[in-house]
Image (tube, rainbow, N blue to C red):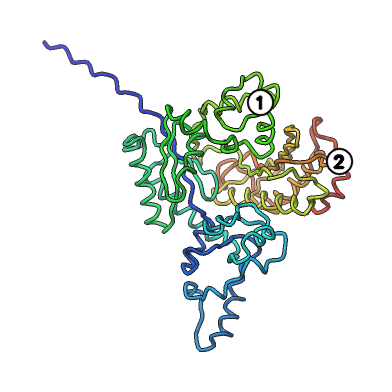
Amino acid sequence: MLSPVSQPPSPTPTRRIAHLDMDAFFASVELLRYPQLKGLPVVIGGGRRREDDMFARLREAYPEREWTGAELDRIPVEFFPRLESYVGRGVATTATYAARQFGVGSAMGLMKAARLCPQAILLPVDFEEMRRISRLFKNTIREIAPVVEDRGVDEVYIDFTHVPGGQRENGRVLARLIQKSIFQATGLTCSIGVAPNKLIAKMASEFNKPNGISIVQTDDLQGLIWPLPCRKINGVGPKADAKLQGHGIHTIGELAQRERGWLVEHFGKSYGAWLHEVSWGRDDRPVQTESEPVSMSRETTFERDLHAVRDRAALGTIFTRLCEQVAEDLSSKGYAGKTIGVKLRYDNFQIVTRDVTLDHFTSDAATIRRQAGLCLKRVDLDRRIRLLGVRVGKLVKPGTEGEPPAVYSASPHTPTPRDKTRHDHNDLLFPELDG
């Protein structure tokens, strides 16, 4: 009797994580509606849509024609509003690549953008259409690769490791398939970075924009990642970068040469240890599917440190937008939460958080803003701020078992001992935070 032939064990597949970023997403969605603007500098941001005003001007100029919403692609370019005529405190959500060549970027004040590129066309954001296209491209990805982590309206992480074809050409074949499928479904392009982990994949997705694919492997760390400036690390903002440069550290490779203990001494126990790990390309975070989040948050690091008094208007606008973005994320993914909190990082890198737990679940932007505003009143706003974030935790999906009714109303809160100090003078800085 022949003994069975033993089969060699299957090799463990190489971990391949992709970061997919839609190219100039907000602007590209608008160009689907207005294809006559392709190739022109276009900035997305500002107030509400005013298509009715545009149609009124068109009917006045062309009384012989019937202008309807179905004819948006026929509107002459000269009828679109120009950035040079903008007056206000709005912020650019994004810009086309033609506008970026003039220095216009995301989160830039529109007044500053107008000085850089006054001839740019200004269009407001259509959040409903953005969410529709966002759902469409993400569903397209999940039909090909099911393990997808949603990172906002225009970007995702994808685990290629066990997907059929995910190892071919180090992930390039699958990335091309996803690009092609998204373009067929939406008419939009995206850029994809494939790497051993999320940290490097996100950096790689920026290498060949727009409509590019970049593959980074473990052996590429010194050749491709170390020459990059430290600012390319997701989590190193302008203030941290400036401090690193003050110590003669300009590139990720130079950061990697510093001892862990030195980084902890100069940047704190948590952040310093993290800097050491990421400089060596280490990141074991899994790709988490939509069914797994315990909280959702939005935060932003400012180009310069802001002060609650001198930069009150800018901070108020940014704070409101963060609350709205968290609410949009919750609604688009079908979640509600009952713990609402804020996060601040001061100019000395100290981080403070405050939160409040409601007696109900909510995904309402106004409720989130009100409760997050009350949390802000329990932190020191006399110091300069470099990062501001808003978080909603204790999430449930409406209709799940044991979920109480989602009543949108304020609830009393007794501060915990660690944060019960109320900075009453904050009422003078941000009197609108209560509503």
Of 216 and 362, which appears nearest the observer? 216
Residue furthest bottom in the image: 64
Q: Compared to 143, does 167 lie above or below?
A: above
Tell me the crowding category of disc 2: few under 14, some 14 to 19, or many 20 or more residues within 10 angstroms, Cα based: some
Q: Is residue 385 left or right of residue 275?
A: right
Measured as percent of width and height from the top left, residue 348 is found at 75, 33
* Mark 2 element type: loop
The quadrant in which residue 188 appears is bottom left
Say which quarter of the image contains residue 339.
top right
Q: State the residue in front, 274 or 116.
A: 116
Task: Mark 2 or mark 1: name the one nearer the start of the chain.
Answer: 1
Q: Amino acid at mark 2?
A: His
Position above or below: 307 against 261? below
Mark 1: secondary structure? helix
Q: Position of residue 337 (x, y in %)?
A: 64, 43
At 59% across and 40% down in the image, what residue appears?
402
Q: What label does residue 423 carry, if any?
A: 2
Whole-percent x and y of residue 396? 59, 42
Q: Label for residue 92?
A: none
Which residue in the structure is indicated by mark 1? 270
What whole-number distance in Å separates the C-alpha atoms at marks 2 and 1? 27 Å
Q: Residue at x 65, y 35 (%)?
A: 241
The N terminus appears in which quarter of the rendering?
A: top left
